[in-house]
Each structure stands twice: as C-alpha cells, then as structure tokens.
Image (cartoon, rainbow, N blue to C red):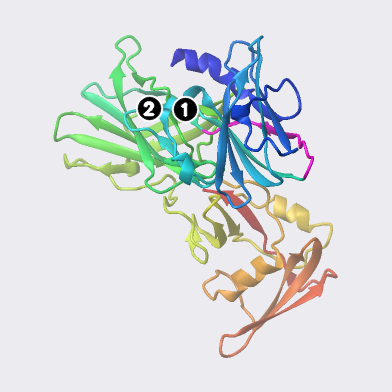
Amino acid sequence: MKHFIHSAAAIMSGFVCLVSCSEQESDLLSANQSSNNQLSIVTHTREGETPIASVYLFNGSNAFVRTLQTDAAGDYSSASASVKLPAGSYTICAINSSGLSHFQLPDETTATPTSVISVAEGQTMGDLLMDMKTVTLTNGDNAPVDMELQRKVLELSSVTISQVPEDVTGVTVSVGSFSSAIQFNGTYVDTDPISCTFSLTHNTTTGNWESTPQQLVFPSIGRPSITITFNRGEEDTHSYTYNASAALSANNKYDITGTYTEVSFSGTITSQDWPDDPIAIDFEFDESNIVNNPSGNEGGSNSGSGGETSEAPEAGQLYNDYYVVSVDPANHTAVLLSNKFRKDLTQSTYQTYMSGIPKPQDSTGDWRIPTDLECKSFLSNPATPGIFSDSSENYFCYVEENLNWCHAVKSSDGTITFTLTPSGILGTVYLRPVINISY
C-alpha cells in the first residue's frame, strides 16, 4: 500500500489520446478491415508507471463492440493500439488496467455504458482511473479524441483519537455511507451503500488511539456520518456521531483526527489531494452527540451537529432551518431559500444586501436572485415561511439572463396566479435570494 501512495500521483497523470501516433495495428485489433475509419489509441503515464490501459467500445445503440488493450512501446513511456470500425457513433470507456484484478467487471457480451464495476468478492478496493467520450466516425474518417483519466476513488488514510479516558479498552471509528460501485460511464451507484469501520490501536508513546488503514473507497453519498465508539467492556459502550460538513470526494486522501475532552470532541478531517495541498475540515463533538448509553450515564441523543439534520433535504420542507426550493438527488445538490428578504432596494444596493446575509452550511456559491421557476415554486407552497402577508406580492427573479419581477396574486380559494414583467426597479418588489448547497 505504501508503494501505492508513492505511485498514485504518477498514475493520475496517465491519459488516453485517440490520435494518430505510434500505433501498432494488427488483424486481432481490427473490427472491420474493409473500413476506412480508424481509431488510433495511445496511452501515456509518467516514467516508471505502466502505460497499459483497457478500452471498451460501445456502438450508437450502447451495445458492446469490443475491448482493446494498448501495447507498450519500446521505451515503455507510452502504449498504443488501433482499430478499424464502420461509420457510426461510438462510446469509448478507458480504464487504467493496473488494478482491474480488484474489480468485478460485467460479461462483455451483455455490457453497456451503464453496466456496473464493483469490488470483486474477497478483494479490497484498488485504484481506479477512468474516462468516457463519444465519437462519430464518417466514411474515411480518422477522428482524434483526447481522454484524460480521472481517479474515481478516495483514500481514508489515517484515523487518530486523542485524550481518550484511561478506562477505555477499545476504540472504533466508522465512516459512511459510500457509493458501492461505478458504471462504465463514470456514474456512481448509491444502492447498497457501504461503510468503513476501523479498530484503533493504543499508542503507548503518544497516548493516542490510531489506525492507518489507507482504505480506498468510492466517494461518499452526500455528507458522511462519522461514529466514534468507546468500549469499556462487552456491555459498556458509548458511541458519538457527527455529520461531516461536506461530502468526501474522489482523488483526495483524508486524515480523520478527533480529540476527546470529557464534554466535547473536536478535530479535523484533512483532505490530501492528489497532488494539491491538504484541505482541513473542522468539526466538534459534545455529549449531545451520544447515540447509545447502556450504562445509564447522563447524555442526550443527536444524529448531527449544531442542531443540523442528518436527513437529505426534501423539496417543500425545511432543511437546517431553511426552506428547500428544489433538490437534485442524482448530484446531491439542493437550492435553499433565504430566511431574510426585503424591498426598497435599488440596482446599486441589492448585491450589497445579498453579500451581507450569512450563508448556510455546505453552500457552494453566493446568494443569488432566484429564477422565475424557483420563484413560482416557493410562492406556490403555502408552507413557505414569510409569504403572502398581503393578497399579492412582487419578487425579483431572472428569466434566462434578464432581470424580471414576478407578480403573484393569491385568490380567496388559495389559487395563485403569476405575471412576469421585465424589471424596472420598484420599491414594492421583494428581494428574497436563494443559494445552492451540496449534501
């Protein structure tokens, strides 16, 4: 595994180029020798790393065509292959093949771009770099397509818990949930999510409880939960859980560090990017985070931190005290509505107003004026906090790139009608911004 850490950054630079250079053409690699349409494939990695890659070809109907295995050139600095194909559209999935023995691949005869790659039974996760492109070949074509392999896994490098009480006889840390597999097209599979549990060892020199699992996993499904368990015997365990402030993403190495101070935990998750500088994510635990307490000692129960919920956001509901305008579950993003809003703003003051509103946790940008669809969405729900103090209200919104205002009228039967007007700034128009978050 130490060899993997030193070599991971080098593997990351590997990329596949569908270009005409140094190819080795053979009858074995030709799908249709009578065709004039040729794909030339060359793979590169840094010196000392294998340049060999597996390339899967699918036709325009997403049916499997064939695999190609690039062959190493004489200087072993690149590998290449070529194939002739009939005219048509093709999906090309390239996978660095140095760790494929760790994975279960689908049967080629039934494979499609959405077929699943998972960890093989009895194997631990290996490194996995992939990319996908589509190309259309016309008669006589030789289409160059560049593909850069992206790492699809992350590493849980180390776990350290310090200032553990002397009567604790064992410490375990569980992190999850993580995606269970990945499709050929690079989409992660969130069904049957997995968690990673590590048993820590007491370091008598430092007094810390430590583990260096260097465990590779697919990215987390939203913000993962981290659970620390203290054992003082078979029937005396105390577990504390915390929801991380951000998702754990591919191509990062994470160090989890926690400190127990009798009434609280504090610590960091350090993200060691391949190859950029580490990013620290701070978190705290206190006794309200305890989730089991069979010994009967004092302590509350909380699945999050700071009063936050561990549930995924749901459109039309509150999430961490903010109204949820919309949710994109596939990308684990959502749009939240500001609790603050005001009118009597001018063109020169509304940006300053938005910049002064505190952002919710996990925001991925700045407060912004909602689109017309977002505006209609939160005005259509009578459960939205703070709407319709009068029978009609006006809100700023964007229609494509044009600033408008939405005139909403609520009738006696609860029906709401909308009229969009190109904006001149009016003193009776509310600004109620929205913000994007990840979860």
Between the residue at mark 2 and the residue at mark 1, the CA separation in whole angstroms equals 11 Å
Identify the residue shown where x is 48% and y is 40%. 108
Q: Is residue 167 above or below residue 389?
A: above
Identify the residue shown where x is 58% and y is 58%. 336
Identify the residue shown where x is 55% and y is 74%. 381
Q: Where residue 169 appears, x then y in whole percent?
A: 21, 23
Other residues around mark 2 within 10 Å, as few (<14) / some (14–19) / many (≥20)? few
Identify the residue shown where x is 44% and y is 40%. 106
Q: Nearer the viewer, residue 425 or 362?
A: 362
Q: Is residue 320 above or below residue 148?
A: below
Q: Is residue 372 left or right of residue 404?
A: left
Q: Earlier in the sequence, mark 2 or mark 1?
A: 1
Q: Amino acid at mark 1?
A: Leu
Residue identified by numbered label 1? 100
Q: Amino acid at mark 2?
A: Thr
Q: Nearer the viewer, residue 312 or 24?
A: 24
Q: Is residue 3 left or right of residue 412?
A: left
Magenta residues span 139-152
Q: Is residue 364 above or below residue 10?
A: below
Q: Is residue 86 left or right of residue 101?
A: right
Q: Nearer the viewer, residue 325 or 111?
A: 111
Q: Secondary structure at mark 1?
A: helix
Q: Is residue 226 left or right of residue 30?
A: left
Residue identified by numbered label 2? 124
Other residues around mark 1 within 10 Å, as few (<14) / some (14–19) / many (≥20)? some
In the image, residue 328 lies in the stretch drawn in magenta: no
Q: Which label lies toward us, 2 or 1?
A: 1
